[in-house]
Amino acid sequence: MADNLASHPPALLQADDARAAAVGVVLVGDDLGRACFVLTRRASTLRRHSGQWALPGGRIEAGESPMDAARREILEEVGLELPGSSALGRLDDFLSRSQHLISPFVFWAERRAELLANPQEVAAAYRVPLDNLERPGNPRRDPLLNFAVLDTTVFAPTAAILLQFRELALRGRHVAVSHEEQPRFAWR
């Protein structure tokens, strides 16, 4: 994969041309009392980013705030209705190669909240324990930032947002992630 990236210099991305999107790092407990985040597998029938691993979220509609869009998309995709008071904070915007300016928010959901994947948008929704964010992917095999999660690999932009969340929430330090490259399949 490194050769594949070397033949494509970094894109000159412009936030002015990007489509606005918002996602949520939704924190929720599991039956064992562990803190988890919600991760989805996008439906294979979607026109864009089908089958990819993602945080719940999507397009910001006209007149909608980024946080309201994230909350609406979380409800539509995984059935969690989150009040405005559930927002814990906001992470840095991430401009993707597919020309989405992603505004990530961190939310807290009730421990017993059930995830109900909307099959038109999400093939499956998972609770992933936060300690999974301590297991990086294989840097020898793949030079792109990634996490080994659920017996698969999650790449940027999702991995970049999760890295920033991990560093800020679990280690108390801010790291910039806007420079993190994405695999070619995420560019469209």
Image: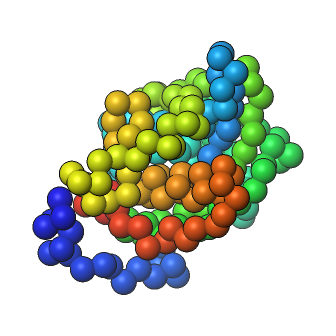
Chosen colour scheme: rainbow
Specify the quadrant of the image occupied by residue 171: bottom right
Q: Position of residue 181 (x, y in %)?
A: 36, 67
Residue at 74% x, 25% y is 111
Q: Position of residue 40 (x, y in %)?
A: 48, 36
Residue 31 lies left or right of residue 158; in this view the side is right
Q: Is residue 139 visible?
A: yes
Going by the picture, which residue comes out furthest to the top?
Answer: 31
Q: Is residue 45 above or below residue 91?
A: above
Q: Position of residue 182 (x, y in %)?
A: 34, 62
Residue 108 lies left or right of residue 182; in this view the side is right
Q: Quadrant of the C terminus?
A: bottom left
Residue at 29% x, 54% y is 139
Residue at 59% x, 51% y is 166
Q: Nearer the viewer, residue 47 or 129?
A: 129
Q: Is residue 69 above or below residue 51?
A: below
Q: Is residue 101 visible?
A: no
Specify the quadrant of the image occupied by residue 114: top right
Q: Position of residue 4 (x, y in %)?
A: 15, 65
Residue at 81% x, 43% y is 86
Q: Quadrant of the N terminus?
A: bottom left
